[in-house]
């Protein structure tokens, strides 16, 4: 059962005494959780304590010389980052845009120790600190929204950790008193209500600095006013709030992933502790993509390979995982963080990090200008540009790499250090109370499986070093000064607790075995360690325009080489099917043309797998296995994030499965396994499949459909219970092929009910046009179940509705003779249950 909504502050006396005694003995320079917060959470090392090396440093330098370093020139309007911004006392209206940017700017500036970037950052920070209002509020005086202050608080917190600026503690103290006084009368709403975890994280940070008990009261108020994220994640309730945008908006969902962990620090509740894990399980089952993240365009968008992920979603999932890893100490969190960082994040950027994509897709064959038919559609949503899609991402994206660096290691309350994510860095920290340590992490990981930790100490010290053993690694090994360490277990955090001395060396070896993972439509993705691999495409870039800031373009990207391949794989023993070729490590490994690790695999083209109706992306990966009469070729696979166009969900070449004789689904387990949706938002509630309230700008929101590609029938009886509201219509679709987002973007037949018109309707969709075929009057009660049955034999169709034993509609049509079954709604909220299909003999 869920924990009480009120925060239960707790800690046993003995544990309090124990922690207090340790703190007094060790005199740690870090501020760990004070009672009554749950003990044990790691803390971030101060910004600047971790410096990037190797390929990771190159990403930061590209960002400095590209998108971040030139952001104020690119977005120089007063409404954005101009000198007249209201975040500098001007007349502009910068809302979230300035705080997003400054959050990433501060992290990049002090991680690189770059004087020019620091000067830019300090301009914004100093104005904000020096212009706090008398009542404690901060930011532009006319801004009443709580939300934009939350990302700015991260920027100011990070700045304090890097500089020790004495203004900051008092600044936060005054603002949080203002919040405590004013939230009852002006509660959180919309963005601030969905992203409350950001606020709570800074509140608990300050509490651990000052011990001010009023901060716990504020945390209590914030938790109570936030969306019930713990319930939402635990019970898969993302679509339960109807037209409410935020609980199904994947950026907000990703940003709130840290909320249950932060709440757990306040409550100690197992329910809160487990909520993020359960939420991710739901999200990946229903919306998961190959690189470890959920789709969202912008609403949760299902598992189709032609659905996208927003750049904001990528960086917010990363930050939430970074925060949660410090609280929950679960190795799978670090695994997922790495997978997203090493695959999704570089995929969002051009190779020089000057341009970005608002949306990227697992199977993306173009970057271009045009309509996508997504729920939230932007005509430049997959244009590679400094201005791609909506403005949020061009400001929020800057934190991705620098936050990954600063969160890759953490301090532990037992005087040690923990590695959250592996990458080439140098760490300067304090251990065992007040002993300074320098650790160089030498590695080309994730492109190489060896990590060497070189330890420098002025004097010996005993402290634990907590190592995350990846869940994908079956035969991990750890040595200290050449001696093998025992007790290493896959998917666990191993604590290496010993007396350390100068020049000690720890070597971690994580052999990267090849694996395949199941994806939509029975397709597969190929993985090696934390990297997902994609078809290497010969990409051709065309500049639509160069912007006033020289070197920044709007690029369209097209494949010059074939992309529509299926793979010949032995998934039971993938080593027999895939060859690994290695080369020298380049300066920037996120470039498909300069790869240290390339995979070779046999493949055949699938000529019938083509570009979708709108010419913006491919049709969804065809259901396999399937046969090809094309010649066998050897193709190259490169890491997912090394190019802006890719195929990462591959159909399998092989003997097709026998035709199904029956299919059924009743959704009683709360799952819609095998159902793939194209437009809208679909979910299960109370044992029924529901089309979500998903109002949006795109055509896909108006006529959403959900299809079972693995349930294809020729002659059959197809029946189900259907309910619709008083507006619009919904019903069964069958003999479906080539589904894509967009109301009329499929081929096949439709039988539906219309409660507003009291009518049963039959029609078909061909060439993106719906054609009515037949209809009949029928009393259809809104929001009540109506049983629909269709008998299809060749070109003859009989339709039954309700309890009638005689057809209400009959018709003849021979255009489509085989295809998948599914469900379609048009301008209505519809439900479906008790699905049954039985094949009829030819």
Image (cartoon, rainbow, N blue to C red):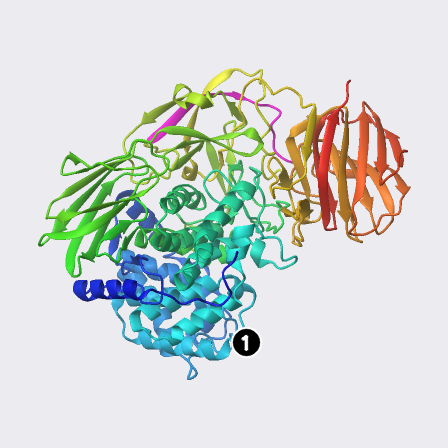
- Residue 260, visible in the rendered structure: yes
Report crowding for label 1: few under 14, some 14 to 19, many 20 or more residues within 10 A (C-alpha): few
Disc 1 secondary structure class: loop
Residue found 11% across the figure and 45% down from its top: 503
| Along the viewing direction, whichever of 796 and 97 lies nearer the viewer | 796
Q: Say which quarter of the image contains residue 154.
A: bottom left
Residue found 24% across the figure and 66% down from its top: 20
Q: Is residue 295 above or below residue 197?
A: above
Q: Where is residue 411 in the image (x, y as percent from the top left)?
A: 26, 56
Q: Position of residue 702 (x, y in %)?
A: 71, 49
Q: Image quadrant for the C terminus?
A: top right
- Residue 67, visible in the rendered structure: no
Residue found 57% across the figure and 48% down from its top: 300
Asked whether, in this view, residue 744 is left or right of residue 45, the answer is right
Report the span colored magenta.
597-612
Residue 261 is one of the magenta-drawn residues:
no
Q: Position of residue 370 (x, y in %)?
A: 60, 45
């Amino acid at each position: 059962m869920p924990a009480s909504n009120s925060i239960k502050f707790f800690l046993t006396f003995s544990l309090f005494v124990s922690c207090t005694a340790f703190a007094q003995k060790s005199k740690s320079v870090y501020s760990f959780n004070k009672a009554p917060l749950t003990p044990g959470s790691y803390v971030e090392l101060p910004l600047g304590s971790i410096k990037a090396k190797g390929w990771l440093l190159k990403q930061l330098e590209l960002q400095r010389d590209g998108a971040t370093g030139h952001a104020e020139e690119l977005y120089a309007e007063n409404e954005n980052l101009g000198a007249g911004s209201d975040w500098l006392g001007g007349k502009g209206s910068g809302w979230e845009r300035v705080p997003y940017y400054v959050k990433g700017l501060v992290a990049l500036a002090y991680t690189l120790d770059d004087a020019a970037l620091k000067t830019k950052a300090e301009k914004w920070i100093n104005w904000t600190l020096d212009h706090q209002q008398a009542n404690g509020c901060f930011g532009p005086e006319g801004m009443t929204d709580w939300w934009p202050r939350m990302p700015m608080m991260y920027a100011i917190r990070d700045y304090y950790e890097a500089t020790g600026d004495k203004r900051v503690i008092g600044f936060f103290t005054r603002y949080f008193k203002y919040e405590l006084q004013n939230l009852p009368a002006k509660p959180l709403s919309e963005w601030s209500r969905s992203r409350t975890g950001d606020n709570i994280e800074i509140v608990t940070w300050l509490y651990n600095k000052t011990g001010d008990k009023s901060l716990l009261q504020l945390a209590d108020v914030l938790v109570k006013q936030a969306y019930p994220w713990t319930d939402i994640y635990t019970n898969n309730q993302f679509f339960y709030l109807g037209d409410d945008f935020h609980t199904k908006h994947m950026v907000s969902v990703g940003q709130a992933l840290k909320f249950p962990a932060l709440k757990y620090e306040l409550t100690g509740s197992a329910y809160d502790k487990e909520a993020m894990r359960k939420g991710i399980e739901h999200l990946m089952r229903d919306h998961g993509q190959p690189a470890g993240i959920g789709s969202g365009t912008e609403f949760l968008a299902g598992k189709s390979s032609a659905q996208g992920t927003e750049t904001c979603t990528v960086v917010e999932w990363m930050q939430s995982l970074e925060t949660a890893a410090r609280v929950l100490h679960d190795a799978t969190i670090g695994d997922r963080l790495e997978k997203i960082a090493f695959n999704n994040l570089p995929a969002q950027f051009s190779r020089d990090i000057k341009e970005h994509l608002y949306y990227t897709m697992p199977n993306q064959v173009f970057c271009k200008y045009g309509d996508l038919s997504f729920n939230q559609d932007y005509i430049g949503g997959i244009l590679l540009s400094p201005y791609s899609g909506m403005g949020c991402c061009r400001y929020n994206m800057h934190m991705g790499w620098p936050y990954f660096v600063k969160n890759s290691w953490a301090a532990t309350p037992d005087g040690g250090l923990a590695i959250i994510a592996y990458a080439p860095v140098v760490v300067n920290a304090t251990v065992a109370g007040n002993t300074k340590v320098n650790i160089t992490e030498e590695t080309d990981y994730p492109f190489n499986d060896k990590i060497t930790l070189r330890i420098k100490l002025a004097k010996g010290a005993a402290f634990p070093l907590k190592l995350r053993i990846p869940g994908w690694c079956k035969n991990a090994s750890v040595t200290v000064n050449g001696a093998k360490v025992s007790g290493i277990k896959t998917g666990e955090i191993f604590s290496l607790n010993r007396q350390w001395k100068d020049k000690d060396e720890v070597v971690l070896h994580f052999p990267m075995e090849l694996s395949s993972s199941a994806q939509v439509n029975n397709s597969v993705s190929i993985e090696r360690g934390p990297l997902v691999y994609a078809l290497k495409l010969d990409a051709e870039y065309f500049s639509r325009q160069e912007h006033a800031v020289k070197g920044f373009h709007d690029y369209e990207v097209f494949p010059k080489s074939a992309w529509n391949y299926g793979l010949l794989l032995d998934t039971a023993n993938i080593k027999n099917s895939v060859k690994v070729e290695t080369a020298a490590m380049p300066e920037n490994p996120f470039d498909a043309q300069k790869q240290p690790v390339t995979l070779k695999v046999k493949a055949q083209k699938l000529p019938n797998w083509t570009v979708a109706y709108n010419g913006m992306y491919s049709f969804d990966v065809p259901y396999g296995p399937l046969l090809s009469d094309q010649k066998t070729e050897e193709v190259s696979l490169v890491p997912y994030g090394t190019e802006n166009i890719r195929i990462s969900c591959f159909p399998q070449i092989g003997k097709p499965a026998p035709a199904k004789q029956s299919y059924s689904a009743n959704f009683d387990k709360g799952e819609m396994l095998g159902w793939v949706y194209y437009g809208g938002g679909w979910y299960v509630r109370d044992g029924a499949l529901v089309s979500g309230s998903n109002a949006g700008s795109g055509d896909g929101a108006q006529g959403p459909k959900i299809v079972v590609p693995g349930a294809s029938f020729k002659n059959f009886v197809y029946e189900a219970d259907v309910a619709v509201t008083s507006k619009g219509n919904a019903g069964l679709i069958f003999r479906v092929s080539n589904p894509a987002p967009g109301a009329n973007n499929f081929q096949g037949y439709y039988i539906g009910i219309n409660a507003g018109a009291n009518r049963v309707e039959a029609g078909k969709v061909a060439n993106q046009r719906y054609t009515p075929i037949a209809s009949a009057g029928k009393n259809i009660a809104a929001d009540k179940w109506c049983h629909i049955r269709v008998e299809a034999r060749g070109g003859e169709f009989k339709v039954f509705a309700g309890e009638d034993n005689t057809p209400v509609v009959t018709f003849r049509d021979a255009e489509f003779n085989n295809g998948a079954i599914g469900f379609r709604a048009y301008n209505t909220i519809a439900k479906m249950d008790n699905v049954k299909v039985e094949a009829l003999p030819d």
